[in-house]
């Protein structure tokens, strides 16, 4: 990938390193962190070198009567204007210049526009959020509707305490996992995996591990909108999936309906609350109708935030026979493995390069009770 803003835009911190060398460096880093716990070879899943991000956010820089896209600069003390971003998927890349041109032709759409967010699917559906430092009125709505129709996109307007949805506030992605299509509804403002190509690899890797287990029920913590839950459910009798975000749980339940899946129960609970529920510390109204003792859990899947697992959740996780751990921070994964490998053995490991040209990398391990 090449970009005119390399070395100026602060987004791509590894811009001066060939992509294969980036992947090699990440492999060496994660392997070093995990070497105490895993003596096998990490499987590497590379990303596309360009047009891989289906979610992107840009500031808007005003110069006189003109708007431009902008990103934080390399020195982190200002912004740099850009005309394109080779990281974004083709649907976003095609939309960006046409959207900006239309905004610059409209005093109403341009006035006090602060930022633009894009969310797209592989099949070309694009949702654009225009964020303002002013109240949005009927005139704005009329202009924005014309822009929405002209570009064949969905538009949302946001300002302080205001959200204007012109048509819909979501897109519907289709990911093909092991030749089976799965539909996911992605909402504006909700968490989604930014790299659909590598995300597909991550899910397929998890499915391969689940297929090898081949029995019992699955419990999943931090399930989000059901990214892993839906494909994995084909390989377990029943699935109990938990997530603290109300919006993510709503999307997850809609995704179950979209895919006609009938063996998943989603519950809005934090990992800390699930620890209390398993310990019988107190009853939870949100678990009404869910009999934890009726499940035959053979496996637990966790995909925690960058902070990793807290102590109580680590203790809960260590009670299951098989652990699938997906991590967005190899350092906290290594920390958690110090505890988990006291009771479990790491059988498989992988890295998933969701974020080319940055130092970030996702990883995953499978552990089996000793």
Image (cartoon, rainbow, N blue to C red):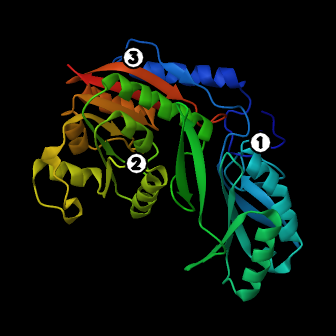
Q: In the rendered image, which quarter is residue 273 located in?
A: bottom left
Q: Is residue 360 visible?
A: no
- Gap in angstroms between the C-alphas marked 3 and 1: 35 Å
> Element type at marker 3?
loop
**Foreground mark, 3 or 1?**
1
**What crowding class fits label 3: few (fewer than 14 Cα within 10 Å), some (14-19), or many (20 or more)?**
few
**Foreground mark, 2 or 1?**
2
Give the label on residue 86, or none.
Answer: 1
- Asked if marks 2 and 1 touch (Cβ < 8 Å), the reply is no
Across and down, in percent, residue 13 comes to 67, 37
> Element type at marker 2?
loop
Give the label on residue 261, or none.
Answer: 2
> Element type at marker 1?
loop
Numbered disc total? 3
Across and down, in percent, residue 180 comes to 53, 36
Across and down, in percent, residue 10 comes to 69, 45
Which comes before the other along the chain, label 3 or label 1? 3
**Nearer-the-camera pick, 241 or 48:** 241
Q: In the rendered image, which quarter is residue 36 located in?
A: top left
Relative horizontal placement of residue 348, taking residue 91 as reference (left or right): left
Relative horizontal placement of residue 167, taking residue 181 as reference (left or right): right
Q: In the rendered image, which quarter is residue 315 located in?
A: top left
- Gap in angstroms between the C-alphas marked 2 and 1: 37 Å
Q: Where 83 falls versus 13 (above or below)?
A: below
- Gap in angstroms between the C-alphas marked 2 and 3: 39 Å
Q: Which residue in the protein does label 3 denote?
A: 35
């Amino acid at each position: 990938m090449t970009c005119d803003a390399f070395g100026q835009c602060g987004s791509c911190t590894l811009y001066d390193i060939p992509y294969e060398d980036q992947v090699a460096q990440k492999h060496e880093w994660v392997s070093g962190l995990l070497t105490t716990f895993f003596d096998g070879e990490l499987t590497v899943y590379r990303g596309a070198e360009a047009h891989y991000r289906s979610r992107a956010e840009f500031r808007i820089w005003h110069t006189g009567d003109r708007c431009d896209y902008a990103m934080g600069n390399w020195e982190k003390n200002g912004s740099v204007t850009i005309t394109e971003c080779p990281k974004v998927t083709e649907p976003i890349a095609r939309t960006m210049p046409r959207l900006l041109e239309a905004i610059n032709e409209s005093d109403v759409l341009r006035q006090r526009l602060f930022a633009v967010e894009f969310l797209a699917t592989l099949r070309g559906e694009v949702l654009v959020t225009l964020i303002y430092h002013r109240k949005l009125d009927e005139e704005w709505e009329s202009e924005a509707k014309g822009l929405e129709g002209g570009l064949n996109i969905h538009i949302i307007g946001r300002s302080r305490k205001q959200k204007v949805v012109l048509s819909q506030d979501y897109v519907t992605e289709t990911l093909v996992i092991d030749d089976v299509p799965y539909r996911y509804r992605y909402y504006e403002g909700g968490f989604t995996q930014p790299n659909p190509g590598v995300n597909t690899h991550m899910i397929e890797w998890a499915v391969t591990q689940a297929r090898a287990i081949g029995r019992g029920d699955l419990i999943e913590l931090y399930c989000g909108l059901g990214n892993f839950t839906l494909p994995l459910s084909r390989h377990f009798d029943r699935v109990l999936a938990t997530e603290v975000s109300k919006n993510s749980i709503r999307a997850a339940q809609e995704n179950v309906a979209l895919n006609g899946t009938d063996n998943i129960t989603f519950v809005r609970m934090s990992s800390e609350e699930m620890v209390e529920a398993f310990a019988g510390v107190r009853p939870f109204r949100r678990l009404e109708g869910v009999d934890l003792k009726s499940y035959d859990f053979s496996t637990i899947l966790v995909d925690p935030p960058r902070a990793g697992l807290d102590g109580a959740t680590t203790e809960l996780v260590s009670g299951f026979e098989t652990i699938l751990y997906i991590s967005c921070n190899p350092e906290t994964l290594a920390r958690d493995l110090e505890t988990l490998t006291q009771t479990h053995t790491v059988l498989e490991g992988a890295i998933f390069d969701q974020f080319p040209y940055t130092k970030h990398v996702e990883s995953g391990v499978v552990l089996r009770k000793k």
